[in-house]
Amino acid sequence: MNDYTSDLITKASKYIPGASYYTLGLNYPGLPEFIIEKGQGPYIYTTDGIKMLDVTLAHGSLILGHSNKIISEAVQKQISMGTALTNITKPAIELAEIMVNTIPCADKVRIVNSGTEASILAVRLVRAVTGKEKILKFEGAYHGFADNLIFNTNYGKPSEWFPYPKASSDTLGVSASQAETVLIAPYNNLEITSRIIDENIKDIAGIIVEPVMRGINSQTDFLQGLRTICDKYKTPLIFDEVITGFRVSLGGAQEYFGITPDIAIYGKSLGAGYPIGAIVGKDSLMRYLDPSSENGEHIFSIGSFHSNPLCSTAALYCITELQKNRSYEKLNSYGDGLRSGLSRIFKKYELPHFMTGLGSIVEFFFTSEPVIDYKCSINSNLALKDLIGSKMAEFKVVGGGGRYTSSTMHGKRELDWMLEAVDLSLDNAQYTGALNSILEKSNK
Ligand SMILES: Cc1ncc(COP(=O)(O)O)c(C=O)c1O
């Protein structure tokens, strides 16, 4: 680490809590080992001048890679015309049009600043529409950091959780009364989920689900089963497409699986690295965001930067770019190549594993059992996964411990780089004995 970097980290320790913006698992992950200074395509460059392959991509947001020229030029042009223009803006209108033409459930669109904001609005909307209060979410799903859904996420401590359907908060600072408004069900388990819904339907305002839950695939019939239950009870179904939207296909997971929710929320890839969120849905619900709605049937939703022209421009050009150049063929073939390459490497080290994820969302777990829900994922050998994660930076890869993403800028060279890094991480762990020690511990 050069002096410049170590000075920055010292300054960060002085002025930023924990010198980190991560509170993953609510554990302190230690001081950063490097600081990213710039990004270009699939690579980042640290303040030490080291080039690294980026497979985290701002939590999966940079679907066109870093500093995409077309997006940067469009945003720069917009900067010269104003960065915050208040109320609806031309780029946000054009963005809404392209989203309606692309996303099956979208009759109307509202642009906000993050996935968290979109999920806050989605919850408020279904409560307003149904006059009910409880939201059913799935164990292990993350829908943003807001108070209303920060329960039983993948960041919590499952050993301390209540049995279904009682919600357990994953952070201090959330009012206990919030927990009373959330019901928890196991992902991919229609039997338990429908029992919880049947027993609580008089209070349920909506069901929110990630169509691919943090890399765990939804099983055939699960999403369809939720659709059928929601139709039966006339309960709004919300797809959280913050990860899947514009990543698994242009119309998101709803297009990929052929199941249309009533509302969907977006973020990440939509903005190609610019801070944006969106809520889209059927007219019958979205009319609650229309201030001229009859009988005063509307909800409060104002943000100083909503409909922001810069981020809307980025999103507009992002979707236009994704429509071109066989983007999804490229993204999916990289993802499939990574999944099969990783599996080949894990077999070489005789590590039982389960590969999952969809297209360019690539996830793996060390276990002989299929991973279909959050409990299965935490029962896998996470120490082994962490071992690989902890070593990847040595082999010049940012983002080690699974749920790898890619961009349209990731090609054969990056795939080879990535696979070599995983192979070398395991080879090194085998040589030092760290691999055996973890395997022995997990056999006890
Ligand atoms: C599925 C899902 N929903 C919502 C969010 C929150 O989005 P943001 O970080 O933009 O607030 C995330 C973020 O990781 C996410 O993965």
Image: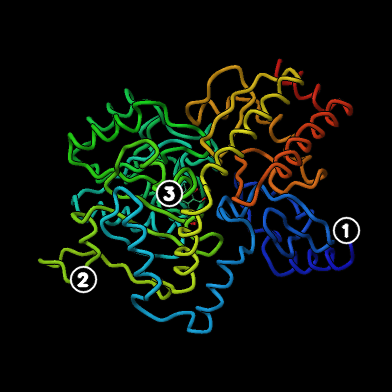
Amino acid on which disc 2 is placed: Pro
Furthest residue to the front?
325
Say above or below: 8 vs 336: below
Q: Could you tell me how far apart the alpha carbons at marks 2 and 3 are, in whole angstroms?
A: 30 Å
Label 3, ligand 1: CB separation under 8 Å: no
Local secondary structure at mark 3 = loop
Q: Give the number of the disc on residue 291.
A: 2
Say above or below: 309 vs 344: below
Q: Position of residue 388 (x, y in %)?
A: 74, 35
Placement of the N terminus among the 4 image quadrants: bottom right
The residue sitting at 69% across, 32% down in the picture is: 385
Q: Position of residue 307 (x, y in %)?
A: 39, 71
Q: Could you tell me how far apart the alpha carbons at marks 2 and 1 are, in whole angstroms?
A: 55 Å
Q: Position of residue 239 (x, y in %)?
A: 36, 45
Specify which label sits upstream in the sequence, 2 or 1: 1
Label 1, ligand 1: CB separation under 8 Å: no
Where residue 342 sits, quadrant-wise, is top right
